Image: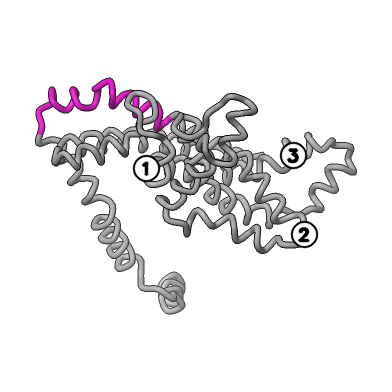
């Protein structure tokens, strides 16, 4: 009797509808927006024979694009992991003039059209641009129209994901914990590695995964600065667009399915590491 009354009271206090209705809406929403397009992608690819699918997926030009896309995305997400943490730390812990402006600038890649970002980056980092010309004359290294330009563009669009994921966690960290560690004789490195880093690790992995996933599907900001040289600076999303322009929809779906499966496996691994780090942090 008491359990029934308690359950009824919880239902009355609930702000949103019950579990059955909300779960039904959730599944319907995810099915329409996520699952059905994925299923349609695989069905479109299966219009080809397995031999044709393998020939398209293992084409040397496609393999070179996979290598560049995943490698550049991983490097860009790793760079953002370091500098995103530093940016979030400065924005939270250090008051300085113009902090609100800097904080707003972090979200600029979210609002800026990717094509505009690509044109701006190309204008700056090409050998005719102010930064690219100085860099080439000083170090003899080209940025635009090389793999380095691809990494630069992917780093630009991925930074906000790390900063905005880590920033709330840093805000929740009490500075008294750092002061207590220092009073016990811990160095700055020990305080970071043993006190701060375990608390930040789940958020860092989440930000890394989001930046990595965003970079994998990026097209607009990369297509201008990459130069699109086959076997060198050609990303997989560009190959998909090329096949669509040639009305090879099944071929484009095949490349998309390969990217989808590879991205799913990698994100599954990253999420597994995140769950492991969270469980480890709770048990310590």
Query: Where is residue 263 drawn, in percent x and y?
Result: 37, 36
Mark 1, Cα crowd under 10 Å, few <14 / some 14-19 / many 20+, is some
Q: Nearer the viewer, residue 9 or 224?
A: 224
Q: Residue at x 50, y 37 (%)?
A: 126
Q: Is residue 257 above or below residue 114?
A: above
Answer whether labels 1 and 2 touch (C-beta < 8 Å): no
What distance separates the C-alpha of mark 2 from that of mark 3? 21 Å
> Quick check: 92 left or right of 234?
right
**Could you give the CA–CA distance between mark 1 and mark 3, rounded to whole angstroms?**
33 Å
User: In which image quadrant can residue 16 be found?
Assistant: bottom left
Give the labeled residue for mark 1: 217
How many marks on residues? 3
Q: Secondary structure at mark 2?
A: loop
Residue 192 — which label? 3
User: Would you say the magenta stretch is mainly helix, strand or loop?
Assistant: helix
What's the residue at 23%, 38% (across, down)?
242
**On screen, 159 above or below 139?**
below
Name which of mark 2 and mark 3 comes first in the sequence: 2
Give the magenta part as a residue range. Answer: 48-70
Q: Count neighbours of disc 2 (C-alpha within 10 A) and say few if under 14, some if 14 to 19, many if 20 or more.
A: few
Task: Please say whether residue 63 is one of the residues in the magenta stretch.
Answer: yes
Q: Quadrant of residue 199?
A: top right
Q: Secondary structure at mark 3?
A: helix
Of all residues shown, which one is farthest toward the top?
60
**Residue 95 got which mark?**
2
Labels 1 and 3: the sequence-earlier one: 3
Given residues 167 and 94, the one toward you in this image is 94
């Amino acid at each position: 009797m008491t359990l029934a009354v308690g359950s009824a009271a919880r239902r009355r206090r609930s702000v949103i509808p019950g579990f059955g209705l909300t779960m039904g809406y959730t599944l319907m929403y995810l099915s329409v927006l996520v699952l059905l397009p994925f299923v349609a992608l695989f069905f479109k690819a299966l219009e080809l024979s397995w031999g044709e699918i393998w020939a398209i997926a293992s084409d040397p030009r496609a393999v070179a694009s996979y290598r560049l896309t995943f490698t550049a995305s991983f490097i860009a997400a790793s760079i953002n992991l370091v500098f995103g943490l530093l940016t979030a730390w400065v924005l939270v812990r250090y008051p300085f003039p113009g902090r609100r402006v800097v904080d707003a600038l972090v979200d600029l890649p979210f609002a800026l059209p990717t094509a505009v970002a690509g044109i701006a980056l190309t204008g700056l980092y090409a050998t005719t641009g102010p930064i690219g010309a100085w860099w080439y004359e000083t170090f003899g290294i080209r940025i635009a129209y090389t793999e380095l330009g691809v990494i630069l563009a992917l780093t630009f669009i991925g930074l906000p994901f790390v900063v905005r994921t880590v920033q709330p966690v840093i805000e929740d960290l009490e500075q008294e914990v750092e002061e207590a560690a220092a009073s016990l004789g811990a160095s700055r490195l020990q305080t970071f590695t043993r006190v701060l880093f375990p608390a930040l690790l789940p958020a860092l992995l989440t930000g890394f995964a989001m930046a990595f996933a965003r970079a994998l599907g990026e097209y607009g900001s990369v297509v201008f600065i990459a130069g699109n040289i086959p076997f060198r600076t050609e990303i997989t999303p560009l190959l998909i667009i090329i096949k669509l322009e040639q009305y090879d929809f099944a071929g484009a779906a095949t490349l998309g399915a390969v990217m989808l499966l590879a991205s799913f496996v990698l994100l599954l691994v990253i999420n597994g590491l995140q769950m492991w780090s969270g469980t480890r942090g709770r048990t310590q």
